[in-house]
Amino acid sequence: RLLAMVAVLHTLTAPCERIHPAPRAARPARPARAACACAPLRDSPRSWAALAGPGLLLSVGVSGALRRRGELVGRCRLGRSQRCVAQATRQKVRLSEGANFYKVLGVTRDASQEDIRAAYKKVIRETHPDINPSPDATDRFIQAQEAFRWLSDPQQRAVYDGVGGKFGQDALYDYTDEPILGSLSQIQDVDLLTPAAPMVNRARTEIFSKQAVKIDLNIKDVRARFRKYGAQRLMWVKNYLCREIRKVLQYPKLIRHLHPFERLSVELSLMQHMDKGGVPFGQLLGALKELRQRLNEETAVRAHAASKAERGRLATFIADEGISEMFELVLNHAPIFEQFLAAQRAILAAPVIDLDKPTVVFVGAPNVGKSSLVRSLSTGRPEVRDYAFTTKQLTIGHLWHFIAGTPLLIQGQILDSPGLRGVSEEEQNLMDQLTFGAMNHLPTAVVFVFDPFPCTHGLLSIEEQVELRNTLRLRFPRRPWLDVITRIDLEEAKEGLEELSELFPSAIQVSSLEGTGLEELNMQVRRLLEEMTKVVRQLQRSKLRQLRVGVDNGPHVGKEALVLR
């Protein structure tokens, strides 16, 4: 311990130009280094402990002194250009293509976590910038930190071992989480309509108890004073009620400018709401628009009568009577308000697609097992039943994935779509149009699911499923594509399985019940997410290029920008 304390005191009293800077005129010119000593400390808080060695970790006071030493160095002052150069250099070394992290640390692939940690400490002690100022040592120091960051975590180490020599080749280093393309939630940003009774009670409280309108005492004529007061009260109540209604009257204009896929999703949600006994959305909007017009007419008549009243008391009486009639008119439309709220909740139940996230959509015939696969791979929880058309709306699940060769963690979207019965427009209903819209208007990869034994609950035979798949493939030839055969655990499906295997030898055979093939399907879906990440980044660049030149074609990128068509 005494020797350790002497070594630490020697380190603390050593001259450090960044802790005790010399005067600017007398400071000698120093060659620019790739990275400062404080940069690795921010990336790896344990680098000072690793530099100290195993012997120095025996003393609590020594570790505290080292921590104070790291804090002092971390407060060093660098110029803006030097910091930018250092950060760019660190990123360039950290994300180097084909980096062999085991070779950087000097260990084998079957090394244990203790061996990796010991090798990391040894490399850090030899290549730290304060000990070895050469640029090569700095690069190796940063590479060692990145290698330890990947190999110290068993899950990240498994990802790195699976990628192997291709580490860093397909990495999207400029991928960003910023909402450049946006999400398809524009119509869901509209506020919910306030029910009739709470709206009337709030207006009554404001106008009577809190006195939202004040009497103008500057008017000397008492009669004119109360005439103006009565007209202003009527106008305030009318403006308050119409303002609450006006918030939802923007739906027609908003729907006309929606993304095509979002419009289809909203139409399907409202259609399902009508099937459950809801009133058509257009009729509700017409009733609210008529209510607003009647409030304006009633206010105009009452305000004119109050302003022409013979006495101030009569003007107050006319204003009170007009306010009561407006409140009664709104309360009589309470069922309309409730029906409109139910329609708004149906719109809010529609899925929200984030265009800045890579997306994979599962398509196929009705009742082929798409929902079971989505439940097995992602956080989505679609309804699973043994009858057709269980999925009547898109269900979204999410899957977290590391981009190969980078420390980037992306969140992919997994879509479960309603079953398709055909590809011709005459055979399509609104659910079929929504599934086609997901492939036609969204940048998505496609996973087509086959059922080798459709005789139980499926609606399409094997030949019809193959025809559907080939038609979709011809329509979307450049989409990342994956074929999957489900329900291979059924004994009756052997004949159909052999037929599909001959037609599509690269198709993945899975069983959601027994878990067979799910691991391979999981890896292939993650590969599709990586490919779609590149596509999303291309669309983001197109959007940024449009904004940079001053051309904005709307809140979303049109399908002409999709390179997958």
Image (cartoon, grey):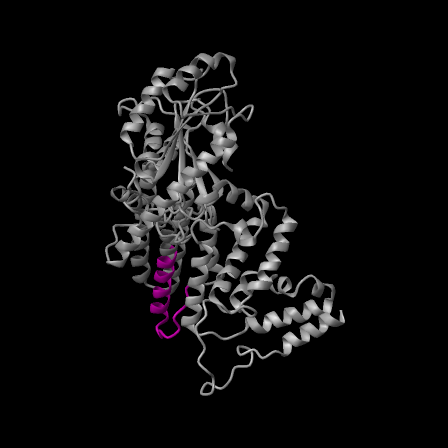
Figure check: 536 above or below 473 = below
Figure check: 12 above or below 467 = below
Position of residue 193 measured from the top left corner of the image (x, y, whole percent): 42, 46
What is the chief secondary structure element of the magenta stretch? Answer: helix
Q: Quadrant of residue 368?
A: top left
Q: Residue at x 60, y 63 (%)?
A: 125
Q: Quadrant of residue 79?
A: bottom left
Q: Is residue 55 left or right of residue 289?
A: right
Q: Quadrant of the N terminus?
A: bottom right
Position of residue 231 measured from the top left corner of the image (x, y, whole percent): 34, 61
Figure check: 112 above or below 371 = below
Q: Is residue 128 left or right of residue 52?
A: left
The total number of labels drawn is 0
Q: Is residue 213 inside the magenta stretch? A: yes
The answer, for residue 316, to whether it is visible in the render is yes
Task: Write the start and end of the magenta stretch as one range.
Answer: 212-237
Q: Residue at x 41, y 53 (%)?
A: 173
Q: Quadrant of the C terminus?
A: top left
Relative depth, front residue between 76 and 13 = 13
Relative depth, front residue between 529 and 185 = 529
Q: Residue at x 37, y 66 (%)?
A: 226
Relative depth, front residue between 474 and 25 = 25
Position of residue 325 measured from the top left corner of the image (x, y, whole percent): 39, 49
Relative depth, front residue between 81 and 491 = 81
